[in-house]
Amino acid sequence: MKHKILLVAGARPNFMKVAPLLRSLLADGEFSPVLVHTGQHYDDHLSGCFFRDLAIPDPDYHLGVGSGSHAQQTAEIMKRLEDVLLTEKPDSVAVVGDVNSTMAAAIDSSKLGIPVIHVEAGLRSFDRSMPEEINRVITDAISDLLLVTEESGRRNLRNEGIPDSRIHLVGNLMIDSLRQSLAVACRSDILARLSIDGQPFGLITLHRPSNVDSRAHLQEMLLALAEISRSMPLFFPVHPRTRAQLAGLGASLPDSITLTEPLGYLDFLCLMSRSSLVLTDSGGIQEETTALGIPCITLRENTERPVTIEQGTNVLGGTHQETILAAWRNVLEKPKRGSIPPFWDGSAASRCVAAIKAYFGISKPAAPLVSVAAFA
Ligand code: UD1
């Protein structure tokens, strides 16, 4: 009997993690995966486009929950997913990342007694005002197998009392997708579509509620970005949450900042890999810029991904005009070269599969399993 594993994805940053994991589970032959899309993200440019770009098969279930308050969205996912779990009776449920779909699926599964595997476990910003931090802490507390992307994840989980036997450093699935897709992404015509003709340019992404929901705050960040754009044009694919706030601001941005719709995975990867600087509040983009060796200024006061600062190309720019500009001047004077963190090598998915097989006693591990003890 194959091990039935249900994979849950719901929002944009989940899809590039689920794609390589699903592929490796299928290739292994010992698993019968069931893919569930919660529908937390539903616009083509936040969801459908990623399924096409990453060649993810159509989900077996689409829950169509849509947007809502945190409570409404989480509750709706829990209600609809419970029916799927009762029908499918999977042997385990794999959740990725830190979005509401991740936490909702983990709660449902653990209450039904189904073992939960959390991929990208242990990351901590220690900032409970971030909805993602709440999702991370809760998901990890009720997960059975915790697969971490960086050493800090193991440390944080150990500090929270989780035994080493349930923690494995597997590397970063997002970097698996990046490595698999980069050559194809480089053939995108996005540079021509945006009339970028070889001159250095920077890229902005902003969508955290803490940055964009307060207009005064957003306005201040835009002043810093406008200043930076005087030395290099900036391109800004705008998340729907941010688009709504910008419309309310009524402020016009300088011509040196070009707004676009949110971009698909391949277009964005192409643009990022050719950019000279990325300014972002995204979690995943901090990791992708480190993997690509592109300087990144994170527009936040903290990060749950410290390895991108300790080893990668990331620096914290804060969220105030002066701190952002100071970080930018530092990057100009002393650009970080950075190095690739351990196991961000494109093989994280096979390590995930090996860890899952070892944990559930499914034949032999598919690849050498790296014990966290080796990094203690
Ligand atoms: C969610 C995740 C965040 C992740 C981000 C990536 C949580 C708590 N947050 O935030 O961690 O970094 O996704 O984008 O899970 N909307 C659309 N189309 C869509 C989806 C949403 O227009 O397909 C609009 C709706 O107005 C919605 C708003 O965007 O209310 C926010 O969407 P939501 O899924 O609640 O959170 P994100 O800000 O996208």
Image (cartoon, rainbow, N blue to C red):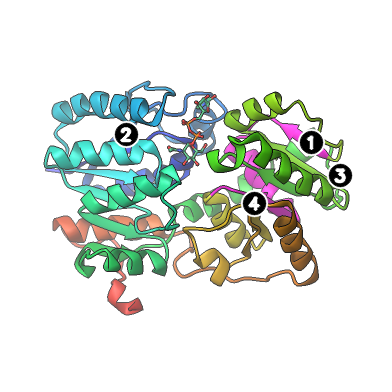
* Among the 4 quarters of the image, the one containing residue 204: top right
Q: Amino acid at mark 1?
A: Thr
Judging by the rendered image, the residue that carries numbered circle 4 is 319
- Is the C-beta separation of discs 3 and 1 under 8 Å? no
Q: Disc 4 on helix, strand or loop?
A: loop
Q: Position of residue 217 (x, y in %)?
A: 66, 42
Please, is residue 2 above or below residue 48 in the view?
below
Front-most of residues 112 and 215: 215
User: What percent of the width, then of the height, locates residue 306?
Assistant: 50, 65
Specify few, some or many for label 1: CA neighbours under 10 Å numbering under 14, 14-19, or 20 or more.
some
Q: Amino acid at mark 4?
A: Thr
Task: Give the Cα distance between marks 2 and 3.
Answer: 41 Å
Tag nearer the camera, 4 or 2 = 4
Q: Residue furthest front?
A: 216
| Magenta stretch in the rendered image | 257-282
Of label 4 and label 2, which has the lower sequence position?
A: 2
Circle 2 Cα neighbour tier, 10 Å, few/some/many (<14 / 14–19 / ≥20): many
What's the residue type where badge 3 is placed? Asp
Q: Name the N-terminal-most of marks 2 and 3.
A: 2
Vertical arrangement, residue 234 with respect to residue 247, above or below? below
Depicted 94 relative to depicted 334: above or below: above
Give the camera-side residue of 354 and 123: 123
| Callouts 2 and 3 close, C-beta under 8 Å | no
Dot 1: element? strand
Q: Label 3: which residue?
A: 197
The amino acid type found where label 2 is placed reads Leu
Choose the circle earlier in sequence order: 3 or 1.
3
User: In which quadrant is the C terminus drawn?
Assistant: bottom left
Q: Which residue is mark 1?
A: 258
Please tell me which of labels 2 and 1 falls first in the chain. Answer: 2
Q: Is residue 236 left or right of residue 7?
A: right
